[in-house]
Amino acid sequence: MLSLSRQFDVPENGVTERRRSSRFPIEREVRYKTLNQRTESLAGSGKTLNISSSGVLFTAEHDLPVGTRLEVSISWPAQLNDRCLLNLVARGRITRHVKGQLALQIQQYEFRTQSRPGK
């Protein structure tokens, strides 16, 4: 469960953390696709590096510009009723990119069920 509360941490160097939500170092498979209607859709995959209630940082096959609208699907580590696999599906905009990594500001999200592999 992700916390939706604001938290401002003061690290050892004395600089106040400006992020509104705690980030959790979770590595999960992620698939993404662009949502811009004016250009050809791009799709790719990667791994999450960290996630919060307001954003996700992940590795990516494409270096996409800031402002690009994306939908990401992340394999969620918890199961529904201990039996049904889940995906976190989120939509938002890229807020920064570094070679091979994208940061997405989450604007909306939902959990979806997924079928088990090989069935």
Image: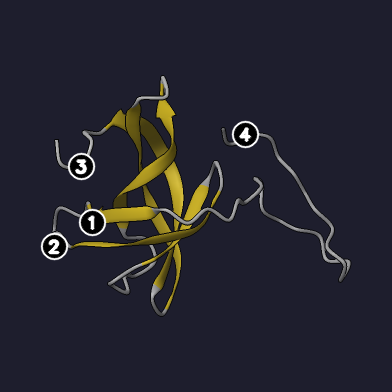
Query: Where is residue 104 drawn, in percent x and y?
Result: 43, 56
Label 4 or label 1, whichever comes before in sequence order: 4
The residue nearer to you, when weighing 49 against 97, is: 49
Secondary structure type for disc 3? loop
Front position among marks 1 and 2: 1
Residue underneath mark 1: 34
Front position among marks 1 and 3: 3
Label 1 or label 2, whichever comes before in sequence order: 1
As measured in the structure, the alpha-carbon distance from the residue carrying label 4 to the one carrying label 3 is 32 Å
Front position among marks 2 and 4: 4
Q: Decide: marks 4, 3 in contact (CB < 8 A)?
A: no
Residue underneath mark 4: 4
Query: Where is residue 80 drawn, in percent x and y?
Result: 39, 24
Label 3 or label 2, whichever comes before in sequence order: 2
Q: Decide: marks 1, 2 in contact (CB < 8 A)?
A: yes
Secondary structure type for disc 4? loop
Q: Amino acid at mark 4?
A: Leu
As measured in the structure, the alpha-carbon distance from the residue carrying label 3 to the one carrying label 2 is 32 Å
As measured in the structure, the alpha-carbon distance from the residue carrying label 4 to the one carrying label 1 is 26 Å
Q: Decide: marks 4, 1 in contact (CB < 8 A)?
A: no
Front position among marks 3 and 2: 3
Residue 39, labelled with which disc? 2
The residue nearer to you, when weighing 76 against 52, is: 76
